[in-house]
Amino acid sequence: MVRPLGLPFDPIERAGQTWEERFGPAAAMRAATSVFRVQQILLARFDEVLRPLELTFARYEVLVLLTFSRTGELPLKVIGSRLMVHPTSVTNAIDRLVAAGYVDRRPNPADGRGVLAGITRAGRDVVERGTRALTELDFGLGELGDRELETLFDVLRRVRLGAGDVSGAEN
């Protein structure tokens, strides 16, 4: 779990006040800094509930993506694209998942140089257990109600769309 800071003040709010005195409007800085802090909090919460399963959230995401695929396997480059991570990160995650027995790796017959990762029965079992743990945790966002979660998703989605995460056809 993230170590509570226990500060007598909100450091992001305090930084915002100082920012305004020195540089001008601080709303964007406060929001961006808050997003980064919440990311730290969420990842720590996820990793805490997944640790007993010997998973990190990054590896859990790979396994979930494989369970979502029609055949239970995907090319590594597709995994990287869908999870929006660097190919090196995908390779590292797959290596660890193979070592744990959660994924098999084989050459991609459709691409002579490519590699397919496929989820194993043990991988499917651990995804189910991890999903239960994360769902019980409300994905770390139990402090928010359904309407707030929808609003948060909508606001953050606008930032992602502005960055080009989704093509214009799907906006």
Image (cartoon, helix red, strand yellow):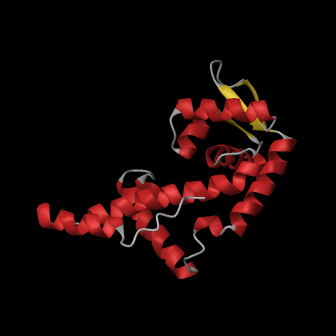
Residue 94, how many percent across, how many down?
Answer: 68, 33
Q: Is residue 171 visible?
A: no
Residue 116, how many percent across, how many down?
Answer: 70, 30
Q: Report the side of 20 relative to 100 (left or right).
A: left
Q: Report the side of 167 relative to 71 (left or right).
A: left
Q: Report the side of 67 relative to 114 (left or right).
A: right
Residue 163, how many percent across, how many down?
Answer: 36, 52
Most extreme residue toward the top, as rendered?
Answer: 112
Residue 134 in the image: above or below residue 66: below
**Residue at image point 85% right, 43% down:** 122
Quarter location, residue 46: bottom right
Quarter location, residue 81: top right
User: Which is nearer the eye, 49 or 96?
Assistant: 49
User: Which is nearer the eye, 66 or 54?
Assistant: 54
**Residue at image point 54% right, 29% down:** 88
**Residue at image point 52% right, 74% down:** 150
Q: Is residue 39 visible?
A: yes
User: Which is nearer the eye, 110 or 151?
Assistant: 151
User: Which is nearer the eye, 40 or 88?
Assistant: 40
Q: How many marks?
A: 0
Q: Quadrant of the N terminus?
A: bottom right
Q: Quadrant of the C terminus?
A: bottom left
Residue 71, how many percent across, how many down?
Answer: 77, 42
